[in-house]
Image (cartoon, rainbow, N blue to C red):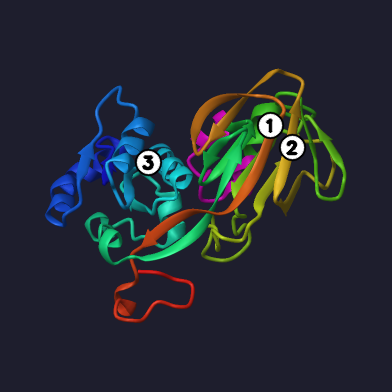
Amino acid sequence: MLFVNPWSGGGAARRAALVARARERGIEAIELGVGQDLDELVAAAIDRGADAVGAAGGDGSVATVAAVASARDVPFVCVPAGTRNHFARDLGADPRDLVGALDAFAEGVERRVDVGEVNGRVFLNNVSIGLYGDAVRHAGYRDAKLRTLLETAEEALGPGGDAGGLSVVDDLGAEHRGPAVVLISNNPYAVNLPGTRGARPVLDGGRLGIILVDPPGRRPGRRARAWTAPVLDVDGEREIVHVGLDGEAVDLRTPLRIAIRPGALRVRVRPPRSTRSRRPRHGERR
């Protein structure tokens, strides 16, 4: 069963006639409408016997379908029909070939990847706290996260400012009160590797990637920290904190408990064309 968001990516799924192409392959496809409860639709499809579920849309749609698939231990297929397709790209999907991505349903290699969870809510990419509103809307945010977050903090706060009264303890035991931004990702981003800006080299490393940016002037010469951990707790002076969850603005109650769930999601990935005929490696299933 494939769930298609027709508005994502400027209508990419409709331009590719994705619903029709899926049905030609024996995949039941539903084009989503306004006001439908996607969680309930996915759960109902699994109850009717769907042996795999997929999403063609942006990060929000993809995360919703994946969360239900993870909870029910059903394989998930990600079709890159969004604007930036972060999770799909990190899985190795070609965003220029939506129709080809459908091959993962029938001939994909299955693997397990991690998901993140914040106060019980699943995320595939990241949780951003603090200046998430300005940072997420910045044109360069997803291509150069650390640099953009530093620039956003300086532009929006000025020297000595902070956002939201957050409190975070880093991997060295130092407490950061009032950081400008905290970005927590499902596996760390490759911040400094050439050609991998905004990408995650692995999705099954079992660690959260954490980037914390202090306000300008707070810690001279040391404005940002980056580390990894299986769990992160974030306290706040306010009862409710504004959060960017896979790019969607949500409100969550403090304290926040953010954790990695290793191997919690079964994904089917279309093999590269040059390796279609190879046998699965140990631990992989077709």
- Amino acid type, callout 1: Leu
Whether residue 99 appears in magenta in the rendering, the answer is no
Earlier residue among tags 2 and 1:
2
Q: Residue at x 28, y 38 (%)?
A: 10
> Do the residues bearing badges 1 and 3 touch, measured as CB atoms within 8 Å?
no
Q: Residue at x 22, y 39 (%)?
A: 30
Q: Nearer the viewer, residue 113 or 225?
A: 113
Residue 61, picture quadrant: top left
User: In the shown orientation, is residue 252 left or right of residue 31?
Assistant: right
Coordinates of residue 182 in the picture (x, y in percent): 68, 38
- Amino acid type, callout 3: Gly
* Rendered view: 261 above or below 251: below
- Amino acid type, callout 2: Asp
Query: The magenta stretch spans which residues?
Result: 133-149
Q: Secondary structure beneath disc 2?
A: strand
Residue placed under numbered mark 1 in the picture: 256
Q: Secondary structure beneath disc 3?
A: loop
Q: CA distance from mark 1 to mark 3?
A: 25 Å
**Which residue is the extreme one toward the bottom?**
278
Residue placed under numbered mark 3 in the picture: 58
Coordinates of residue 193 in the picture (x, y in percent): 60, 65
Earlier residue among tags 1 and 3:
3
Residue placed under numbered mark 2 in the picture: 233
Give the foreground label among 2 and 3: 2
Q: Quadrant of the C terminus?
A: bottom left
